[in-house]
Image (cartoon, grey):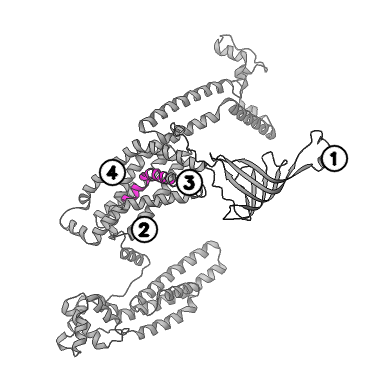
Amino acid sequence: MTFGICLFIVLMQFLWRYIEEFVGKGLDNLVLAELFFYAALQFIPMALPLSLLLASLMAFGNMGERMELLAIKASGVSLLKAMQPLIILIACIAISLFFFQNEGLPRINVKFRSLLISVKQKSPELDIPEGSFYSSIPNYNLYVKKKDPITKMLKEVMIYETSEGFNNMSVFVCDSAQMGTSEDKKFLLLTLYDGQRFASFKQADIKNTSRYNENQFVPYSRENFKTKEIIIKFDGNFDRMEESALEGTQISKNIVQLGLSIDSMTTVLDSLNQKDRRVIGKQTYLTYRTNESYIKKKEAPTKEEPQAIKAEDPAKLVGRIDFDSLLNSYSRSEIQQHYSRASSDAESYKYNIIDLVQKKNLQKNIRMHKVEWHRKFVLSFACLIFFFIGAPLGAIIRKGGLGMPVVVSVAMYIVYYMVDNIGYKMARDAVWEVWQGMWLSSAVFFPLGVFLTYKAMNDSALFNPEAYNKFFRKLLYIKYPERITDEERKNIIAHIPDISSLDVAPEVLAGLQAMDSDKLRDVIQNYENYSYTKDRQVAALSILKSRGAEMNDIIDRRDKRYIDTLQAMYTQNSLIACLGYIAALISIILLPGGWKWIAAGLYAILFIRTVTYYYTFYKDIKTKNKWYHFVISLLSLALYPFLFPFVKKHMQKDKSEVEIITYT
């Protein structure tokens, strides 16, 4: 199921990318079906890792949500041992994907690319609009004011023909016209009725050598006609590209063929490099090496004593002149001129000696073959990587179905695709070595899979919000007041009256007993919203007690001591935040740049502390919606001292409007 979903997603991405190439060309449905069939086969290596990620997330998320993983671990079986059969299955899938890429994909690539290129080269279907110019026919622009849908006649037609150049343009104007195509669909036949033809021409004896002749009007001809036929070359057929044109490219080769091609091209490149080194050794910008005396001296050295060095003999000067002292004897401008001349000579020799175009094309071809060679392994290995990411991630998140797993897997795959695309471009453009760029995504995500597997095996609270909440509170030194103790909670439950001692109507009691525990909790906490009496709330409490249901959340929800302490902590921290706001405002106005940011940061920490107490207070006193709290927080950030009295007043009011239990 997940493979079908993922394959559909990548096919839709392909459709949106090439939709402009398909629309308006009158392609046969069989051609489109064949194109999408080959596209689906070609995208299997891309869709399979994503589908394995989604499937493993869903499977282990469902097992975690239904406590099956907890039962497996409780029986003494580790998560890695429970995953062993699936690891073997995924390994077989990865190996199968490799053989599919190596044996089947080269043939599929050739058929898909040749068909796609043929579709791109197909001429658009002829559909001339009304009231605007149509320029899809080469060398012609057509204007039709109106089309008759019944007779297929074109009304008030203008045709601009530029086949002989813009200066020799012909214009046809007629009352009506009719269009048809030849039997082989390679020509258009336009039959024009009741019109004129205007054409400019240049007489042979007119010479445009003087300014006077250049400014002369160009003569033109006019032709009146009742009926005139125009034949326009317009190939409307669908011509398939020969598959043999793509047989020698890297997409049509398997591992063995790619290796042989890389070796042969590397040999050719090495021979070109050796040839270039020999040529550069002879044709260097140090032209003294081409001097005959220098060459003779290198071939047959003499044992004669060195004589006086002649300035005109450059071969004897080399190695005996201190070039640094020679350069120091010139002025700065002269040195700059010599350097500039040497640089330009070197550049000219480089482009004259080395065949850069051939070498660049050969190097690029070698890189693309290596990219294709590595891709066959990378996508297969990605199946294992995504399984070791999805399975432990599902065990940690413990959410099954198509909700959270789809969001997580798509987000993970988008990041993988971005990293893989970066590595591919780095390898393609020779910024990195090919193996470095192609294996970049695996190098990034494989450690992530190992980390998640380790965390899942050790029951890590990696995605537990409470764990991060505790760390955040500890970092900002936020302390919450203590709730009631277990002893106090048991004492409160013991004082809840039994059902037999209640003075409640039998039909009311029967209705409450028919409810499940969750509904009873809702009645206890919101009985006033249902217009129930206090007796019905007490009866619901008694029924929960008789069932032995969990009641801690109800008892802890509105503890007066807890809420009063929270309000006092909010007030205390708000006064400190007001002082921080004033200090930050003064610092921003008076102090230089660096100190402004420090003061603003300190105020932000104080503000976060007070907002934390504010939201914790209203977590139990649910009298306002979330948007109200968001707006209050946003305004308080900018105007805290002015908004604090208003917030404090409303907190007291909201606390008095809800029922607060006083425990003794």
Label 4 element class: helix
Q: Which numbered disc, 4 or 3, marks the residue that appears first in the sequence?
A: 3
> Residues at badges 3 and 1 in contact (C-beta under 8 Å)?
no
Residue stretch rendered in magenta on the structure? 32-52
Mark sitting earlier along the chain (1/2): 1
Q: Secondary structure at mark 2?
A: helix
Residue 240 drawn at (x, y percent): 47, 38
Estimate the spatial distance between the alpha carbons at disc 1 and disc 4, rounded to whole Å: 81 Å
| Residue at 31% over, 86% down | 531
Q: Which quadrant does the C terminus fall into?
A: bottom left
Let me know if residue 158 is in the magenta part.
no
The numbered mark, 1 or 4, whose residue comes first in the sequence reads: 4
Write the residue at 49% across / 64% down. Answer: 598
Residue beneath label 1, please?
212
- Position of 49 compared to 365: left or right? left
Q: Which residue is mark 3?
A: 27
Q: Is residue 406 left or right of residue 459?
A: right
Residue type at mark 4: give it: Ile
